[in-house]
Image (spheres, rainbow, N blue to C red):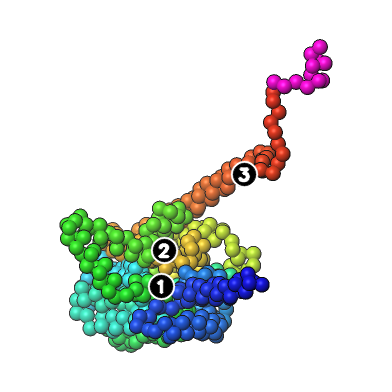
Amino acid sequence: MTEGAEVHPTQPNRADAATAAVTRSRTSSLQVVETDSGPAETASCESEEPDQQEEESSTFPEVQHHSTAGPEGSSGGQVAPDGGWGWVVVAATILVLAMTLAFPSCIGIFYTDLQNDFQASNTETSWVPAIMMAVLHAGGPICSVLVERFGCRATIIIGGILSGLGMAASSFAQTMVELYITAGIITGMGFSLSFQPSITMMGHYFVRRRAFANALSSTGTALGLSTLPLLANYLLSSFGWRGSFLVLGGVLLNCCVCGAVMRPLGAKPKTEARTGPTGNHHLKTNCLSVHQEREGLKGRLRATLSTVMPFLRRHMAFDLLCSNPYFCAYALGVSWMMLGFVVPLVYLVPYATAYGMEQDRAALLMAILGLINIIVRPVTALVFGLPRFRGSHNFAYLFATAVLINGLSNCICGMSPSFPVLLAYVIAFGISMSLVGSLLFTVLMDTVEMSRFPSALGLISIMESIMLLLGPPLAGILVDSTKQYAYVFFACSITGSTAGLFIMLSFYWLDRQKDREVKISSIYKGTNLLKPSIKMTKDCDYSPVPLNSKNDRDIETDV
């Protein structure tokens, strides 16, 4: 009895200790450690905080944007809703893409007026849409930093304000350089801050229906291609290019409204650097500075690289170019494709008007191109959303085929500047363009993990921006030197077709290599399974048989 009386009091103490340890492990990843708080107050916060956060997470049917590192975050993470408020996010993304990605194409409506007003050449005028598209894609790292700091909603609103102010300010430009800064850099940066966070937000809302959501949201580009040229042509005939730019700046402010409906997906994760005491932080900083002074310039370079490399890995995903061959092939192919992908959208209207076509009919061609995208992209969204296509790994080959067809279709435009030929070109180019736009982000999401998608998108955007910056000016140089627009479309045909072939052959070769490795590993595992495995234990009564000993039968046999 005395032994039992001594044992019982210790068991509840162990249970209480285990419960307290579990509570501390759950709350350590969900709350910031507050200094200057009493022990009783801290204990009450630890016991009540998990329950409150569980109730808050159940009231919002969204996917968590930032996953925690604690045990609760790893086991109890919410799945993507694949619907619900996600459809509102898709609708907002459609409008954002209509006002950002499709906007540079309507600059071609003002191309001739800008040339006449500023007395500029084709090369000088083509820098306006080139800088706009280049900054649109090159702002990926900056956009990634702002999304991590302020969230997708605030970043989209900031982008809407920048694009609206930049386009409005461009209406007062007196030189081409001022137009480069206002319409090119400021407006392009606003487009980048609005476009990329909307794509990232939609990718977190949809997993099972991701291909359908991406294809459906890509109709925003088609919506902009079909409406913005007609709107720009009407504004140009009514207010001139300066008044048109001022009105279009007000239209771009609607990106702020679209960003307002992007509901936040969860609380931002608390970084460990901010949870520690400030005194330790200052002490570490002082020690680091003293250490850097001792080592001199070499130590400073090492410290700079130690901070720059994690930043590049987080926001630009340079490591994926070496660790992920699929992403490397996709990034190179898409970047090469962008050299001539948007050039026909800029030069189609000048090409048609240079050979005597009316401005209204030339703008009608751009509107027809947008209407074809509006019709084809929802159809592709429905087809790719079927159960047989969910989780398919053949989207990359469909994308490469669409890029190949899109590149070859430019040869039709170079044959003749007549309206029937250009109409046939617009139809072929529009269908292939719809497939490319529907699968562009789907293939990227299938190639990399969703946690690395923003940084991967930022890196691809940087690579694309270089080609988008070079494409229209190179086409302008070609037109100024040859006085023929047809050579521009033939050059775009070469870049597009070679990019499609590169992506297709690269993914095919990588798939063959992967299948070969899987077969080799399976054969190796099979040979290991065939080998007999005998496990000897200590309880087994086994004694080795001496080879030299002979029993009675052996002796009789010898005799």
* Of callouts 2 and 1, the N-terminal one: 1
Amino acid at dot 3: Lys
The residue that label 1 is drawn on is 196
* Of callouts 3 and 2, the N-terminal one: 2
Label of residue 525 in the image: 3
Mark 1, residues whose alpha carbon is within 10 Å: few (<14), some, or many (≥20)? many
Amino acid at dot 1: Gln
Location of residue 502 in the rendering, given as x and y in whole percent from the top left corner: 45, 52
* Of callouts 3 and 1, the N-terminal one: 1
Q: Nearer the viewer, residue 89 or 18?
A: 18
Label of residue 456 in the image: 2
What separation in Å lies between label 3 and label 2 (alpha carbons)? 35 Å
- Residue interval drawn in magenta: 548-559
Location of residue 357 in the rendering, given as x and y in whole percent from the top left corner: 38, 73
Mark 2, residues whose alpha carbon is within 10 Å: few (<14), some, or many (≥20)? many
**Rendering quarter of residue 221:** bottom left
